[in-house]
Image (cartoon, rainbow, N blue to C red):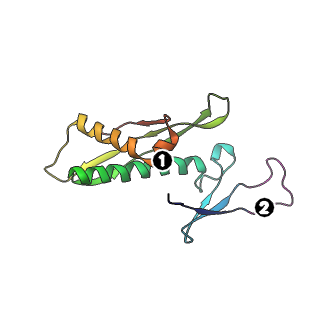
Amino acid sequence: MNELSIKLYWQRSEAELAPGKYTNSHSIMYNDQNKVIVDAAPDWGGSIEHTNPEQALAAALSSCHMMTFLALSAKAKWPVLSFSDHAIAHLGKSSKGQMSVTQIDLHPDVTFDEGFSVDEENLKKMHERAHNYCFIANTLADSVTININS
């Protein structure tokens, strides 16, 4: 199977590594050219100016769902004009009592070419198929909810 990689780099800028006294800000490089600055979530002392791993997880799921939906739509000859989503990662305690992303909600909104429409039931089925085939969703198992915007 394919291997996909990133490069992560963090360096301490403080005199010592002490609890609560260092920055979590670091960079992640995709494909040796696309650099993203990452930090802890703001509730955990990170900067709101940077993305955080929990947002990145929600973004990965949303992106994977969209690409899978588009592939299935193309096969079904559905003329998708645009696709947007508002993904929300919920933080909380897992069944083991550990902090985790306990749920990710997707809110996809799909528009089609003028003159084409799909009833709500078939649109829901296509989103369910996209969810079932999405690599990231399959990794996350049962912690995803899809709320279709209509």
Work out how far the residue at label 1 is from the one at label 2, CA to CA, in angstroms. Answer: 32 Å
Could you tell me residue 74's position as x and y percent?
Answer: 25, 54
Location of residue 103 with respect to 1 vertically, above or below: above
Amino acid type, residue under disc 1 in the picture:
Ile
Q: Is residue 117 left or right of residue 14?
A: left
Could you tell me residue 109's position as x and y percent?
Answer: 32, 45
What residue sits 71% from the left and 62% below the top? 10
Q: Secondary structure at mark 2?
A: loop
The residue singled out by tag 2 in the image is: 12
Does the residue at mark 1 contact the one at mark 2 (Cβ under 8 Å)?
A: no
Quadrant for residue 126, please give it. Answer: top left
Q: Does the stretch in magenta take in 18?
A: yes
Using a 10 Å C-alpha cutoff, classify the residue at mark 2 as few (fewer than 14 neighbours), some (14 to 19) or many (20 or more).
few
What residue sits 54% from the left and 61% below the top? 4
Check residue 136 in the rendering and tell me which mark sits there, or answer none: 1
Q: Which residues are magenta?
A: 11-23
Q: Quadrant of the C terminus?
A: top left
Q: Secondary structure at mark 1?
A: helix
Q: Is residue 59 left or right of residue 78?
A: right
View extreme (bottom): residue: 33
View extreme (right): residue: 16
From the viewer's side, name the closer residue of 126 and 43. 126
Q: Nearer the viewer, mark 1 or mark 2?
A: 1
What residue sits 50% from the left and 46% below the top? 58
Could you tell me residue 24's position as x and y percent?
Answer: 71, 54
Using a 10 Å C-alpha cutoff, classify the residue at mark 1 as few (fewer than 14 neighbours), some (14 to 19) or many (20 or more).
some
